[in-house]
Amino acid sequence: MKNKQIIPLLEGLEKIKSIQDAKLAYAYTKNKRILSDELEVIQETIKALDCVKKIQEYEVKRKELLEEYAVKQDGKPVIEDNKYKITPELEEKCNKEIKELFSKYENDYTEYNKKQEEINDQENPIKLHKIKQSDLTADLTGEQLDGIFDIIEE
């Protein structure tokens, strides 16, 4: 199993959690714990990357720029539709500064995307609890089967 298959399998497990069957319930619980723990390790690995710290630094500086250029109301930047409201006169200048700022961090984004892809494509040696095909209940939908396909053994 590759790391990038963990989240879809967790989502697939969520689709069977309410089925009243002891074997499926056991497989759900056991695999959810295994996968959740592994996902946490992967996420911590990604957070520890130097490029992630640089990207966070960029986001702080970008937010500061947006707040600086934003229309103020009672001394606070105005946010509309999840965006800082910036007057058309200042928007071009703000965008130019953000673009210049991004150019300083562009390599960090490139490195992040590369590392993320490498981590996602890594084979993961975790051992999942398999469900025998003969133990599946008849009321499983195609969507539910598709979601747990990787833990079904024939």
Image (cartoon, grey):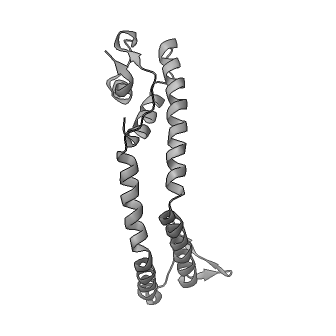
Residue 28: percent from left, percent from top: 50, 24
Q: Residue at x 52, y 71 (%)?
A: 59
Residue 90: percent from left, percent from top: 47, 88
Q: Residue at x 52, y 19 (%)?
A: 25
- Res 132 seen here: yes
- Res 21 seen here: no
Relative to 54, is 124 above or below? above
**Looking at the figure, which quarter contains the N terminus?**
top left
Relative to 76, 111 lies left or right: left
Front residue of 19 and 124: 124
Residue 5: percent from left, percent from top: 38, 38
Residue 16: percent from left, percent from top: 46, 24
Relative to 44, is 87 above or below? below
Which of the 4 image quadrants contains residue 138? top left
Front residue of 2 and 88: 2
**Looking at the figure, which quarter contains the C terminus?**
top left
Q: Residue at x 41, y 67 (%)?
A: 109
